[in-house]
Image: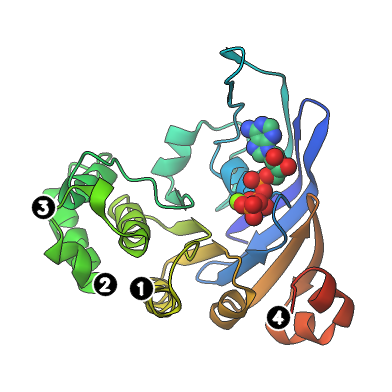
Amino acid sequence: MYLEVKDLTVMYDRAVVLNGVCLQVDMGEMVSLVGPNGAGKSTLLSAIVGLVKWEKDTLKGTVAGRITLKGSVRFNGEELIRVPAHDVVKRGLILCPERGRPFREMTVLENLRAGAYLSNDKSLIAETLNKVFNLFPILKSRASQVSGTLSGGERTMLSIGRSLMSQAKLLLIDEPSVGLAPKVKADLFGRIRDVHQLGITILLVEQDVGFAFDLASRNYVLSRGKVIAEGTAKDLLADELIRETYLGL
Ligand SMILES: Nc1ncnc2c1ncn2[C@@H]1O[C@H](COP(=O)(O)OP(=O)(O)OP(=O)(O)O)[C@@H](O)[C@H]1O
Ligand SMILES: [Mg+2]
């Protein structure tokens, strides 16, 4: 198994956000993770890449509470649960966070180059940049534009492009379609399929269940920090309770 998450539990103070989550992704697979708001999907992706952290308590200006992280995240046979995020990146597990979050004051090209900060291999960087521009021609035409002025769809493409520049082997994409118009969304999903066809393994969190199920070969449904169902789109859609209660279909 390429990625193997076992009994993963995350607690913020006494609030259980992930409760014994088990999930697997094979090399070359595209797997989706769906579920209602607040289910713990983003937390799961963050925990996989070593980014589960307390946020600052804005009222007091201090770090609030205590975090509990238990269980196992194995990638390529190696345990990652205590590996810091900057070392996880080196292994090729890259998170594309919701809304992309590029360095806003930097240009598109600078952002893409920033993705390659771990590499000194100039020809590999040039080759990957070429690949990214082929996948997302819009990024090429916007190369010198400041990233803060990109549209939502372009920002998401930039985030995926930057991950490719980091030599991603496993891409974890968090809600790429949030706030996008239907046509932009359809186009973006086509590009995600192209990225997958380059041989990159993908774990996709997506609120649009129709698109997610269309792209992925297997799917997990997360609710209140627990995996409550797993299977092909056909299996999951055949289950009326799951379809109505968790997928809103
Ligand atoms: N840093 C944090 N500190 C405390 N609680 C947190 C923190 N991050 C997330 N949570 C809580 O954990 C729960 C799961 O949040 P998470 O963002 O993982 O859900 P999600 O499934 O991604 O939801 P959405 O679909 O809205 O993006 C929520 O109740 C959230 O408020
Ligand atoms: Mg989320």
User: Considering the image in quadrants, where does the N terminus appear?
Assistant: bottom right
Q: Which residue is mark 2?
A: 135
Mark closer to the chain start, 4 or 3: 3
* Pointer 4 residue Cβ closer than 8 Å to ligand 1: no
- Badge nearest the viewer, 4 or 3: 3
- x then y, percent, for residue 160: 36, 59
Task: Give whichever of 223, 72 is nearer the camera.
Answer: 223
Task: Please give the name of the residue rendered at 58% of the width and 39% of the height, measured from the top-left corner.
Answer: 80
Looking at the rendered structure, the kind of residue marked 1 is Leu
Say which element carries label 3: loop
Mark closer to the chain start, 1 or 3: 3
Q: Which residue is mark 4?
A: 232
Whether residues under marks 1 and 2 lie with C-beta atoms below 8 angstroms apart, the answer is yes
- x then y, percent, for residue 224: 81, 51
Say which element carries label 1: loop
Q: Which residue is mark 3?
A: 144
Mark closer to the chain start, 2 or 3: 2
Q: Is residue 29 above or below residue 128?
A: below
Q: Which residue is mark 1?
A: 198
Spatial CA distance of label 1 from label 4 is 22 Å
Spatial CA distance of label 1 from label 2 is 10 Å
Task: Please give the name of the residue rendered at 71% of the width and 49% of the height, measured from the top-left corner.
Answer: 38
Looking at the rendered structure, the kind of residue marked 2 is Leu
Ligand 1: image quarter:
top right
